[in-house]
Amino acid sequence: MGVRKTGDERAGARAAVLGRAVALDRGALERLYLKYNDRRFIRSDPVEFVRRYDNSRDRELVALIASSLAFGNVKPIRASVARALEILGPAPADRVTASSPPDLELSFRHFRHRWITGKDMASLLAGVRGALKEYGSLGELFRAKLDRSDPDVAPAAGRFARTLFEMGGGYRPCLLPSPESGSACKRLNLFLRWMVRSDAVDPGGWSEVPPSMLIVPLDTHMHRISTKLGLTKRHTADFRAAREVTAAFREISPDDPVKYDFALTRLGILRGETEEDRAEFYC
């Protein structure tokens, strides 16, 4: 497909969304993937910070920090992630491992990102400290919680989040919510996308976790696009909606259902959601 439609055809396609009578055009998605899934566009995404680190333990930790703070506008997100990494220095995993929880709280006493306080961040990092000491890496912690017989990563993600919460002594749950809460867990799923997938955008590294088990990081951009495409009828971007959207993408990309996430969200974030781009998805 991919042929530009008339106004009447586009109107009919949008009306069809309401009845879930829309199919995804894989060719159009592949064209968007080739266009937007490029390192040139990562400055609009906190994955840029993750790409700066070669050490796997540093990369995991930076990914967790960057994804956990990825709410709000792009500029404040970048500023907050940069500030957190400035506090931790050039070897963040070593710094966290060597610091006691009180030391971390002292270091982050002036930190704030919207309603997330320095104490919240220090507690999360204390949880990471405990995980690094017990498991060696965040990847090993996640693998210890993963059951490949599960339908997706949600159960393991819940166990992973709960372990960090308990090891850290508690923080605002919204900093790293669990799927058990019903939240879409956009930021946790974003972290997992970065760690599991490997391409021009996602750095990867967790080769033992199948990309087929990932769940779409459902933010407002993806929820709006998914609603237009008829992939979910849910008005709230919750965990059930995230699973519905993932199931739709799994039909055309069973081994990698979140493949198109970065490219699709660029449409909204980069204000590139043109009439032609939108029309391409309707069959």
Image (cartoon, rainbow, N blue to C red):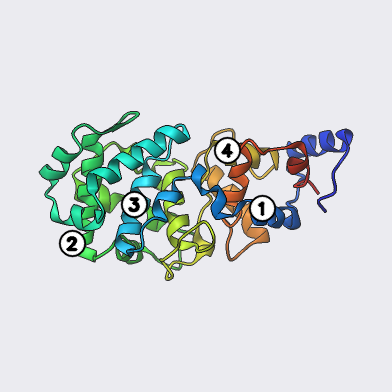
What residue is disc 2 on?
133
Q: Residues within 10 Å of mark 4 (few under 14, many from 20)?
A: some
Check disc 3 and report its element: helix, strand or loop. Answer: helix
Foreground: disc 2 or disc 1: 1
Q: Amino acid at mark 4?
A: Ile
Foreground: disc 2 or disc 3: 3
Name the residue: 58% across, 42% down. 222
Q: Position of residue 261 (x, y in %)?
A: 57, 50
Name the residue: 58% across, 52% down. 246
- CA gap between label 4 and label 2 equals 38 Å
The disc placed on residue 19 is none
Mark 3 and mark 2 in contact (Cβ < 8 Å)?
no
Q: Position of residue 114 (x, y in %)?
A: 35, 29
* Any part of residue 185 in sight: no
- CA gap between label 3 and label 4 equals 22 Å
Q: Position of residue 245 (x, y in %)?
A: 60, 48
> Is 11 positioned to the left or the right of 87 in the image?
right
> Is 206 positioned to the left or the right of 262 in the image?
left
Identify the mark nearer the N-term, 4 or 2: 2
Name the residue: 65% across, 55% down. 33
The disc placed on residue 62 is 3
- CA gap between label 4 and label 1 equals 15 Å
The disc placed on residue 35 is 1
Identify the mark nearer the N-term, 2 or 1: 1
The one of 224 and 3 positioned closer to us in this rendering: 3
What residue is disc 4 on?
269
* Any part of residue 190 in sight: yes
Q: Residues within 10 Å of mark 3 (few under 14, many from 20)?
A: many
Mark 4 and mark 3 in contact (Cβ < 8 Å)?
no
Check disc 4 and report its element: helix, strand or loop. Answer: helix
> Is 72 positioned to the left or the right of 218 in the image?
left
Identify the mark nearer the N-term, 3 or 1: 1
